[in-house]
Image: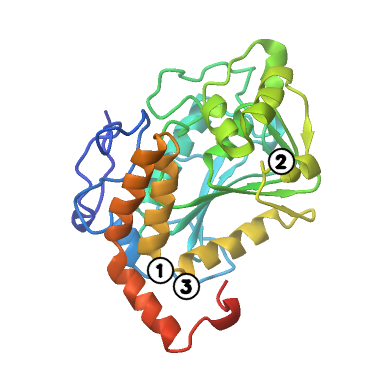
Amino acid sequence: MPRFVRPASYRCQRPLGDLPFPGQRPGRTLWEPGVATNPVTRAATSPPAPFTSRARDLWDDPAMSDEVRYERRGAAAVLTIDRPERRNAVDAATAEALRGGLERFEADDGARVLILTGAGGAFCAGADLKAIDLDVDHPGGPMGFTRLTPSKPSIAAIDGWCLAGGLELAVWCDLRIATRGSTFGCFERRWGVPLIDGGTQRLPRIVGLGRAMDMILTGRPVEAEEAERIGLISQLVEEGQHLARSLELAERLAAFPQETMLSDRRAALEGAGLPLPDGLDLEHRLGREVLEVAARGAARFAAGEGRHGAGL
C-alpha cells in the first residue's frame, strides 16, 4: 500500500486503506484518527493562503500532465481535467494524474478545499472507452481516487456533460455546483459497463435509493433543473459561473473554524455507513474533541459577533 508523505506534525502514520476505528464500514481514508485533538491538525490550524485571482502551480510533479492541471487559487486547489477532445474522459494516465493531484492537495497545508472541474464545456464523460486501460483493481479506484476519502472538503464545479464515471467523480465530492446546461446520467448502461467508482454507494446516499435506482437502471439523462430538484447538485448557476461560484464557496468554507467543520464533516461521512446508535456515538466522540473551539466561538457570539446570521 502506498503511503502519503506528510509533515512531521501531521502525524499520519497509518498506510492508506486501514480502517480508522473499529466498526467503520469498508473504505479508505487519508486521515489518521486518534493521534491529535483534530485528526487533520495542520489543515485545521494553518492559515489559508491569501486569495489571488491568478492561478499558480505549486511545484513540478511527474505524476501530473498537461491533461490534468493542479492550481492554487486562494484557499482552494483547483484540479482540472483538460481533455476536451475526449469530453474529459479518463484513461489510465489521467487517472494517475488525478491521484497525484489529490496527494498534492492533501500535502498542501494552505489548500483547505479541493475543486474538481473539467475544461472545454464538459465536466467528465466517464472512462475513455477508446483506451479501455483503467485499472479496476487499483486501491485508489479506476477513475483515480474514487476509493479514497480526502481529509478536507471537495466541490465539483460542473459544466456540460457529467456522465458515467464522471458522475461518480461528481458524487465523490462533498458539494456540486452546476450550470443550467449540465446533463447527468449513467450512460454506461447502454454498453454494459458497471459502476465501479462508488456510484452505486454514493448516489443513493445523496438522492435516495429510489431516485438512484431510476438513474442507475435506466441510464436516462437528468438535466440540471431535475438534478437540483432531487438534491443531486447543491447549487444551480448560470452558464460560465460554476468555477467562480465554487471558488467563492471555498473561501467561505475556509473562513470557518476548521476544527469543528472538519470534525462534523467526518462524523457525517463515516456515520452514514453505521447503525444510528454507532453513528451517534461517533458524533459524540468527535464532538467532544473540539469543545474548546466551540467555547471560543460561543464567547465571540456573546461579545456581539455574528448577529442575525452575519458571516454565513
Mark 3 touches mark 2? (CB < 8 Å) = no
Q: Nearer the viewer, mark 2 or mark 1?
A: 2
The x, y position of residue 98, in whole percent, is 48, 38
Task: Say whether residue 266 is left or right of residue 36.
Answer: right
Task: Say whether residue 106 is left or right of residue 118.
Answer: left
Above or below, 224 against 273 in this view is below
Residue at the (62%, 14%) spot, across then down: 193
What type is the residue that disc 1 sits on?
Answer: Pro
- Residue 84 versus residue 17: which sits nearer the camera? 17
Q: Which element is circle 3 on?
A: loop
Q: Which residue is mark 1?
A: 257
Q: Which residue is mark 2?
A: 230
Q: Nearer the viewer, mark 3 or mark 2?
A: 2
The x, y position of residue 207, in whole percent, is 64, 37
Work out which quarter of the rendered image holds the N terminus and state it.
Answer: top left
Of callouts 2 and 1, which one flags the residue occurring earlier in the amino acid sequence? Answer: 2
- Rate crowding at label 2 as few (under 14), some (14 to 19) or many (20 or more) other CA atoms within 10 Å: some
Q: Which residue is mark 3?
A: 50
Residue at the (26%, 45%) spot, across then down: 32
Q: Is residue 5 visible?
A: yes
Q: Which element is circle 1 on?
A: loop
What type is the residue that disc 2 sits on?
Answer: Ile
Residue at the (37%, 31%) spot, across then down: 27
